[in-house]
C-alpha cells in the first residue's frame, strides 16, 4: 500500500487564476439560477433599460438578454484570468483581482434585478427600476472589489530607492532648449476600454445612472493611457497625446531640484495612473526610469518616461538660470 501523498498548496499563479475566474463563474450560475426560478413568469421581450424616472424604455428578448449577460461575464472572466498570468503584472495581482470581482458584481447584480423586476411586473411595460437598486449595484460592486483585493494578498510595501542624480545641461546665455517625450501604458488603455464597455452594458441593462461611474472611470483611464511630457523654460507639463491642452503643469518656481531614478509603480505608488500619496504624487504609467521633482512644498512629483535623465538635467539647468535671473 502506497503511503498517502501529502497535501501541497497549488502554485501561486494557479491560485490567482482560480480566484480571478471564481466570481465570474459564480455570477453566471446565479444569473442562470434566477432565470430558472422566474422563467415561467417572465414576459418576452424583457424590459432591460430604464429612464431617469425608472420607467422601462428599452426591451430585448429573454434569450438575447441572457446570452449577452453570460457572454460578457465569461469574456471578462477569461480576460482577468489571463492578466493574472502576466509576469509583469504580478505585483498588481491584488488590483487585478479587485477589478475582476467588482466587474462580476456590477454585471451580475443588475442582470438578476432585471429578471426579478420583470417577473414581479408580469408585463414589460409595467416594469419599474427604483433608484435604490442602483445603490445596491454600486455597494455590491465595491464590496466584491474589496473581497478580491483581500484575496489577492497584501500589497507590496514601498522600497526606498535612492536618486541617481542628473547633471546640468550646458546652456549658453540666451540659449533656449526644450525636451518632449510621449509616455503611455497599453494595459491602461485596454483596462479603460473594458471599463467603458462594462459601463455601457450596465447603463443599457440597469439605466444610465448605473453605468455613469464605470464609464467616467474608463474615459479617464483612456485619456491617461498616452501622455506627452514637456520640459521647457515654463517648467514641466503633462498633456494627453491627442489633445494640445496640459492637464498638469508645474512651473519652475515650485521646483527646487530634479533627479532621475527607477520607479516601481506598485511598490512606490500602489498602482498605475495619476497617483497621490502622503508625500508624493505623479503620473506613473509603467515601471522604469522617471523624472523626480523635489517641490518647495516638500513633496515629490514623479513622471515615468524614457530619457528621464536628460529631462532632469535640462530642468536643473533651467532652474540654475532662473535663480541667476532672480539674483538668488
Image (cartoon, helix red, strand yellow):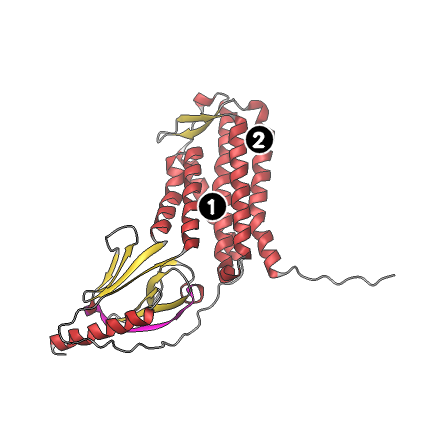
Looking at the rendered structure, the secondary structure element under dot 1 is helix
Along the viewing direction, whichever of 278 and 67 lies nearer the viewer: 67
Mark earlier in primary sequence (2, 1): 2
Asked if the magenta segment contains residue 263, the reply would be yes
For residue 119, the mark is none
The residue tagged 2 is 35
10 Å neighbourhood of mark 2: few (<14), some, or many (≥20)?
many
Along the viewing direction, whichever of 31 and 194 lies nearer the viewer: 194
Counting from the top left corner in percent of width and height, residue 134 is at 42, 38
- Is residue 144 shown to the viewer in this render? no
Report whether 211 appears left or right of 298.
Answer: right
Asked if the magenta segment contains residue 191, the reply would be no
Q: In this view, does 249 lie above or below 130?
A: below
Along the viewing direction, whichever of 229 and 96 lies nearer the viewer: 229
Residue 185: image quadrant is bottom left
Q: Give the range drawn in magenta.
A: 253-265
Q: Magenta: predominant secondary structure element? A: strand
Total number of numbered discs in the rendering: 2
Looking at the rendered structure, the secondary structure element under dot 2 is helix
Amino acid at each position: 500500500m502506497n503511503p498517502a501523498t501529502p497535501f501541497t498548496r497549488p502554485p501561486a499563479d494557479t491560485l490567482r487564476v482560480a480566484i480571478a475566474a471564481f466570481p465570474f463563474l459564480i455570477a453566471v450560475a446565479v444569473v442562470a439560477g434566477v432565470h430558472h426560478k422566474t422563467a415561467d413568469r417572465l414576459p418576452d421581450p424583457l424590459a432591460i433599460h430604464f429612464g431617469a424616472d425608472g420607467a422601462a424604455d428599452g426591451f430585448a428578448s429573454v434569450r438575447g438578454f441572457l446570452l449577452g449577460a453570460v457572454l460578457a461575464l465569461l469574456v471578462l472572466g477569461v480576460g482577468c484570468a489571463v492578466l493574472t498570468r502576466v509576469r509583469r503584472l504580478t505585483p498588481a495581482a491584488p488590483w487585478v483581482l479587485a477589478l475582476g470581482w467588482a466587474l462580476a458584481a456590477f454585471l451580475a447584480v443588475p442582470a438578476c434585478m432585471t429578471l426579478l423586476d420583470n417577473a414581479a411586473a408580469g408585463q414589460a411595460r409595467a416594469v419599474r427600476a427604483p433608484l435604490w437598486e442602483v445603490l445596491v449595484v454600486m455597494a455590491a460592486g465595491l464590496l466584491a472589489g474589496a473581497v478580491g483585493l483581500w484575496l489577492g494578498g497584501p500589497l507590496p510595501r514601498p522600497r526606498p530607492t535612492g536618486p541617481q542624480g542628473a547633471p546640468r545641461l550646458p546652456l549658453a546665455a540666451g540659449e533656449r532648449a526644450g525636451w518632449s517625450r510621449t509616455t503611455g501604458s497599453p494595459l491602461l488603455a485596454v483596462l479603460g476600454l473594458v471599463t467603458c464597455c462594462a459601463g455601457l452594458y450596465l447603463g443599457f441593462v440597469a439605466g444610465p445612472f448605473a453605468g455613469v461611474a464605470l464609464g467616467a472611470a474608463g474615459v479617464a483611464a483612456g485619456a491617461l493611457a498616452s501622455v506627452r511630457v514637456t520640459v521647457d523654460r515654463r517648467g514641466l507639463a503633462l498633456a494627453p497625446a491627442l489633445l494640445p491642452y496640459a492637464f498638469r503643469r508645474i512651473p519652475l518656481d515650485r521646483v527646487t531640484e530634479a533627479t532621475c531614478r527607477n520607479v516601481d509603480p506598485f511598490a512606490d505608488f500602489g498602482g498605475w495612473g495619476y497617483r497621490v500619496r502622503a508625500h508624493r504624487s505623479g503620473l506613473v504609467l509603467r515601471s522604469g526610469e522617471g523624472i523626480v521633482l523635489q517641490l518647495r512644498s516638500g513633496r515629490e512629483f514623479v513622471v515615468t518616461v524614457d530619457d528621464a535623465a536628460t529631462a532632469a538635467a535640462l530642468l536643473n539647468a533651467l532652474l540654475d538660470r532662473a535663480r541667476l535671473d532672480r539674483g538668488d
